[in-house]
Image: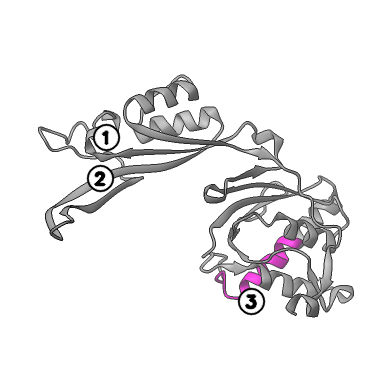
Amino acid sequence: MANWCETYLTFQSNGSEAGNQALADFHNKLSCIALNTKCIDLEGHWINTLWEQDVEDYIMSKIDSLKGKSINANKRGYIDYMTDINNHTFDVVCYDAWMPNVDFWYILTTALYPQGLIEILYQATEPGCDVFLTNDRGLLPRYHMNVSIEGITNLLNFPGMFNQQLSYGPFMYLANQDGIQIYQDYKCNYADRKVLRKFNKIDYCQDFDGDENEILSQFEDSGLGWFSSLNNAIESLNANGAEILQDEFEFEEIHPDQAFFIDKKSEED
């Protein structure tokens, strides 16, 4: 089963009247496809996922010179959500197997409109495959951090995670359930194949994404505490029993294969 790479795509006009018209036309085409495949209702609410293959099939059928052709890019992915146009920009959230599929969108927009009318910015994340990529220099430096805390003993080192007004004696009420996992564990005598004791275990695991200030704000809002810097946060959290995994986004341009299109029959073969 694939790990799904989450990609935020921003389509924006180059600022010209032709660019604005191209952007509006592209957004309208995607909306039409979503309506035809029953991915959005008549009021524009997303109720299902739109597969990239459906997008290609629709677009290719509208361009005579590309009938019988297929985009030379992986299409094992889908659109989960699309925004309306705002200030000559709209966003798409999509998921692809293992890696981002921004080549697909670049080739698609270039096939429909003169190159440069629509610009694409993306941010892709798939921690399992160590994918943290963007072509938006304005986002950098940007980080992805995972914080995990095992057991109630370590969780008690973070009083901000508990509702102090409701907590008393041995009863501690978590102020925020995000990231909290409660499950049943067992202490066993494996030699005699006996379960000696059943008990509930509580862990915390949460992802944080953003620049340094954004992540520090997220830490504070989640009850982990206030910190003056990421280095200070990592040092303090580790000292109190948390485990931190940190990754930094890398800059990567969109660079599709030179052969944008291939015969659809050869792809099927």
Q: Which residue is mark 2?
A: 202
Identify residue for label 1. 155
Q: Earlier in the sequence, mark 2 or mark 3?
A: 3
Left or right of residue 194: residue 238: right
Residue 15 spot, x, y in % from top left? 81, 45
Mark 3 or mark 1, earlier in chain: 3
Asked which quadrant contains residue 173, the reply is top left
What is the span of residues highlighted in magenta in the rendered image? 26-42
Q: Which mark is residue 123?
A: none
Q: Position of residue 25 (x, y in %)?
A: 77, 62
Q: At x 86% / y 62%, what residue is drawn?
A: 259
| Picture coordinates of residue 93, whole percent (x, y) | 59, 55
In terms of depth relative to the viewer, which is nearer, 248 or 120? 248
Instruction: Determine the CA span between mark 2 and mark 1.
Output: 9 Å
Would you say residue 34 sits in the magenta stretch?
yes
Disc 2 element: strand
Q: Which residue is painted at 73% across and 75% down in the image? A: 57
**Would you place residue 221 above or below residue 257 in this image?**
above
Query: Which image quarter: residue 171?
Result: top left
Q: Where is residue 137, by image quadrant?
A: top right
- Evaluate if marks 2 and 1 touch, with contact meaning CB atoms under 8 Å apart: yes
Q: Secondary structure at mark 3?
A: helix
Q: Is residue 190 left or right of residue 105?
A: left
The CA distance from mark 3 to mark 1 is 49 Å
Mark 3 belongs to which amino acid? Asn
The residue lying at 52 percent from left, 27 percent from top is: 213
Residue density around tag 1, few if under 14, some if 14–19, many if 20 or more, within 10 Å: many
Front of the two marks 3 and 1: 1
- Pick the quarter of the image with the C terminus: bottom right
Q: Nearer the viewer, residue 51 or 30?
A: 51
What amino acid type should be assigned to the residue bearing mark 1? Leu
